Amino acid sequence: SKGSYPTFMLKEIDEQPAVMRRIAQEYFDEERQVTVDQDLLTALSAADRLYFVAAGTSYHASLVGKRLFEKYTEIPVEVGVASEFGYHWPLLSKRPFFVFLSQSGETADSRQVLVEAKRRHLPVLVITNSANSTLAREADYTLLLHAGPEIAVASTKAYTAQIAVEAVLAKALGEKLAIQTAVDFDLLGQLGLAANGMETLVAEKDTWSELAHDYLQTANDAFYIGRGVDYDVSLEAALKLKEISYMHTEGFAAGELKHGTIALIEPGVPVIAFITEQATAAHTRGNVQEVVARGAKVLVIANQDCQDAADQIILPTLTTELMPLLTGVCGQLLAYYATLQRGLNVDQPRNLAKSVTVE
Ligand code: M6R
């Protein structure tokens, strides 16, 4: 039930700090050591390439997963949209391992790829929120998100839970492979910082409501931009806003704008920039200048390491690949309030079902 909440989506956004803490509890022991099924780690450590396959928000979480696994395990990762992958299988490496991300565990596009992977006798892990789902039953290994039921059509807490569980698995596998970056990765500390940061964000509902009002209320289009992991989160923030507010929204790699899309920028168009990666912050700021010069209304969401005096939102700094735990929540809150202000049904947008069980 929604309890005292007006919508499931707001309840689920608010639950995220607790979900981070639950994941820390489920996947770390009393000695603060990460604990994941040894058989799964053994099977994974034999792989020469991981194939992440998912749809929608789970695909966006997989993009972040690629960065986490390549950094902490040094195993190359390919990420595929399930509905494409199923009909255009890439040439596989010699020892592939398949990882499916699915909140519901019922997505038909993902299942189709899973069934074919099994037919080819390839090892399969499903990361899901539902232990009794079809995908969980059909996989060799399952990792649970421990996010609790997600009811709103727009996925929120499953996204951040997926990233946290990916980080758990990347650390555990990296440690098993004796990768020093993984040994040094204080994931437990980071999950604590993420939970605290999320708590601050969800406590500032008036701020988010005002920002949605100022930047999005009268707009017909909106653009999210960022580089690296900020690009990944731009895609997710854009999906969130378009699926519930029906605004035309795009997520772009900040540097790619000037290769075409910048033609759409005219006075008053909202552009939301995520700037949390020190290595590329100056470049994204350059892209912000380009759109400001064309009249865009720019909202900058940065972290402490990349902040500028004029930025509207400053987040605490987490390890680069974990910043979506906070920037993702910003995207959720903007989408939520923009939709509410348009008087639309936040939990059940038109044309959409919670789980898409047809290909
Ligand atoms: O249950 P799944 O994670 O497999 O679902 C995948 C997508 O259908 C889902 O993430 C969808 O994109 C959401 N409506 C996004 O908010």
Image (cartoon, rainbow, N blue to C red):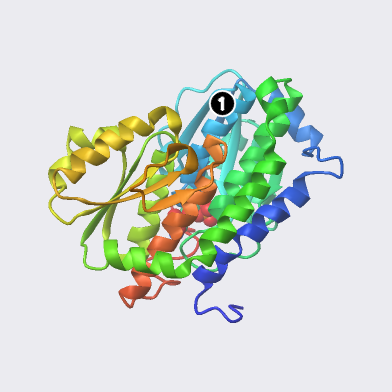
Q: Is residue 11 visible?
A: yes
Q: Which of 130 and 249 is in front in this view?
A: 249
Numbered circles on residues, count: 1
Q: Determine the residue positioned at 66% across, 63% down.
A: 148
The residue indicated by pointer 1 is 70
Q: Residue 124: x percent and y percent?
A: 64, 37
Residue at disc 1, CB closer than 8 Å to ligand 1: no
- Left or right of 208 in this view: 112: right
Q: Is mark 1 on a helix, strand or loop?
A: helix
Bin the neighbour count of mark 1 within 10 Å (Cα to Cα): few under 14, some 14-19, many 20 and up: some
Would residue 120 be found to the left or right of residue 347 on screen? right
- Horizontal side of 90 relative to 3 (left or right) equals left
- Seen from the viewer's position, the closer of residues 63 and 335 is 335
Residue in the picture at 47% in, 22% down: 91
Identify which amino acid the numbered label 1 is placed on: Glu
Q: Residue at the spot x=28%, y=61% of the render? A: 215
Q: Residue at x 19, y 55 (%)?
A: 269
In this image, 153 relative to 267: left or right?
right
Picture coordinates of residue 125, whole percent (x, y) = 65, 39
- Residue 358 visible in rendering: no
Judged from this view, the residue extending furthest toward the top is 94
**Looking at the rendering, which quadrant does residue 347 occupy?**
bottom left
